[in-house]
Amino acid sequence: MDIVVIGIVVLVLLVVGLAGFLVSRGRQTTRLADPPAARSTAAGSGTTTLERPPTRPDGDSIDIAPRPSTVAVPVEMPEPSASRMFRLRSRLARSQSSLGRGLLSVLSRERLTEDDWEEIEATLLGADVGVAATTEIVDRLRTQTRVIGAASADELRELLTVELVNALDPDADRELRLASVDGHPAVVLVVGINGSGKTTTCGKIARVLVGEGRSVLLGAADTFRAAAAEQLTTWGERVGVRTVRGPEGGDPASVAFDAVRQGAEAGVDVVVVDTAGRLHTKAGLMDELRKVKRVLEKRGPVAETLLVLDATTGQNGVVQARVFTEMVEISGVVLTKLDGTAKGGIVIAVQRELGLPVKLIGLGEGPDDLAPFDPVTFTDALLS
Ligand SMILES: Nc1nc2c(ncn2[C@@H]2O[C@H](COP(=O)(O)OP(=O)(O)OP(=O)(O)O)[C@@H](O)[C@H]2O)c(=O)[nH]1
Ligand SMILES: [Mg+2]
């Protein structure tokens, strides 16, 4: 009887133990089976945390590039600027040949008649030199040929060279002002109408500066299109320069401000700020540009405000440019696309009619197709 009772107790204990074991196995299985969702949430949030751009106190997120990327962009060492003009000279000569050829063929005639002088005038006007400068150049040439009598073709060519160089204002200060003031990075603000070549120019300038051994930060204050910031970031990545970006549609002035703040914190030499293309006829957009500059100036002076002009737009470009100069103080002009169908005379017109020095010229879409503007080399290329 006792044995029966003991047997029953042992059996009960075994059943209870077995049940407990099975329940605990069941729980363990659930815990292992559940996590896929839980784990993916954790992984997802981890990634989000890693990839989420830092947030400013005002809530706008700031994305600092280069961002973690699976594709490493090889960092290039840009060509020093000194050798550029030499390399680009032939390209300039090719594109300007109509002006040079036209003038030289008239000047090589034995005696210049009234018709010849009119042809010279028409050639200069056709090359976008502008009425005022053309009249001045032709008048001076006529006076000088009268003074020296029957001038040879070589003498005329020399006179023309001198006149063109003079018309290009050879004494103008064309240096980019890039000295940092009280440890504040030099700020270069790049403005202009749609498609004139602003973003490309920012990228090219960054390359020139890196080539000169300066540290640079790019500010993508074109918040109209995400693609614009992407384009600038790519330029930066190629030379190992960071780009400060804002959210699409965000306030361009606050992105520009942040770029300069971060540049100052990082101790960089120069911050180059790209802006959205804006039509000179859109008052709201022009006001926005004024705000960008005003906000930047809260941190310190803007060293250079460069107006980018597409040389192929000719006299139209001069009209557009004038509106920009009325909105913000421009310190220099970058004339792009001089490699194409542009006429070289536009350089003279821009300088005379705007009273601004052309500091840089764009001679192609390539990364190193930007050169400092030099009146003598330019005229030489024009008449070569
Ligand atoms: N041939 C030639 N093309 C140029 C030059 N500079 C820029 N471009 C081209 O002009 C086009 C417009 O250049 P962007 O730099 O995007 O112009 P943007 O002013 O930033 O344009 P938005 O931001 O849309 O206003 C691009 O296809 C450039 O490659 C140049 O000096 N020569
Ligand atoms: Mg752009």
Image: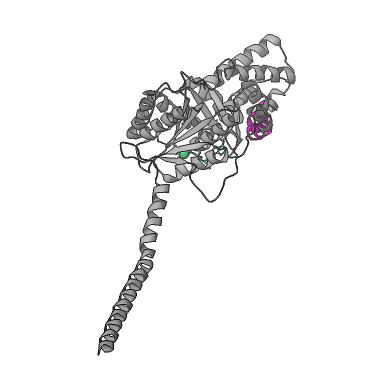
In depth, the one of 301 and 20 nearer the eye is 20
Q: Main secondary structure of the magenta part?
A: helix
Q: Is residue 6 left or right of residue 366?
A: left
Above-or-below relation of 142 to 295? above
In depth, the one of 236 and 345 nearer the eye is 236
Q: Is residue 188 left or right of residue 379?
A: left
Rendering quarter of residue 342: top right
Query: Is residue 88 at all visible to an observer of this figure?
Result: yes
| The C terminus, quarter of image | top right
Asked whether 224 falls inside the magenta stretch, the response is no
Total count of labels: 0
Magenta residues span: 88-103
Q: Residue furthest front?
A: 2
Place of residue 224 in the rendered image (x, y in percent of width and height, measured from the top left): 39, 42
In depth, the one of 157 and 364 nearer the eye is 364
Place of residue 116 in the rendered image (x, y in percent of width and height, measured from the top left): 65, 23
Q: Residue furthest bottom?
A: 1
Q: Is residue 332 left or right of residue 84?
A: left
Residue at 53% across / 51% down in the picture?
Answer: 70
Place of residue 356 in the rendered image (x, y in percent of width and height, measured from the top left): 49, 21
Rendering quarter of residue 62: top left
Query: Is residue 305 at all visible to an observer of this figure?
Result: no
Asked whether 89 falls inside the magenta stretch, the response is yes
| The N terminus, quarter of image | bottom left
Place of residue 170 in the rendered image (x, y in percent of width and height, measured from the top left): 59, 17
Above-or-below relation of 36 to 139? below
What is the image's colouring?
one colour
Above-or-below relation of 165 to 237? above
In depth, the one of 21 and 83 nearer the eye is 21
